Amino acid sequence: MDAIVLLREDHKTVEKLFKRFEKTGDEDTAERRRIADEVIEELTVHAWIEEEFFYPAAREAAPDTKDHILESIEEHHAVVWMLSEIKDMDADDERFKAKMSVLMEQVRHHVEEEEQDWFPEVRKAMGRNRLTELGGELETARKRAPREPLAVPSAGSK
């Protein structure tokens, strides 16, 4: 599978989880917890495979996207921090829903920038064969990716 298609599929998966979360009522704390746990795992894996494999390959193929990549890494850092807080938070906490709402806003903004502004540039620079090869790398890497946000190294630590 093409790497950009794979990443877009991840985006769709997370968006479906967000919509499920938004449909829950205040009494549905157990369901909110289950959904939040799924979101945590999906976003942790996604951020890791992007930072470890996709971003370096994109930067090599399209060096003029460096600023976007650096901004994306910082957005990931903020998201991973929020994920670690949500992971340790009780779903009955009055701030749980608010924290998830802020997370959803940040992720949706990040996804919009990637899909509308950046992915087309990367697709053009990489081409179909390289994106398909990279997609295979991402699928393989996904199996060994961390599942919990604190296991994701800070982007600044490289």
Image: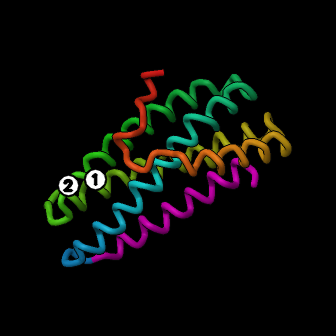
Provide residue 95's location: percent of width, then percent of height: 17, 56
- Picture coordinates of residue 45 (x, y %)? 50, 49
Residue at image mark 2 = 89
**Distance CA(mark 1)–CA(mark 2):** 6 Å
- Magenta highlight on residue 12: yes
Q: Name the element at disc 1.
A: helix
* Numbered range of the magenta stretch: 1-24
112 sits left or right of 4 in the view: left
Q: For mark 1, what is the residue?
A: 87
Residue at image x 41%, y 59%?
39
Q: Does the magenta stretch include residue 74?
A: no
Figure quadrant of residue 127: top right
Percent coordinates x, y for residue 47 in the rendering: 50, 43
Residue 23, how many percent across, how many down?
35, 76
Crowding at label 2, few (<14), some or many (≥20) Cα neighbours within 10 Å?
Answer: some
Q: Please give left or right for residue 156 compared with residue 95 in the image.
A: right
Q: Main secondary structure of the magenta part?
A: helix
Dot 1 amino acid type: Lys
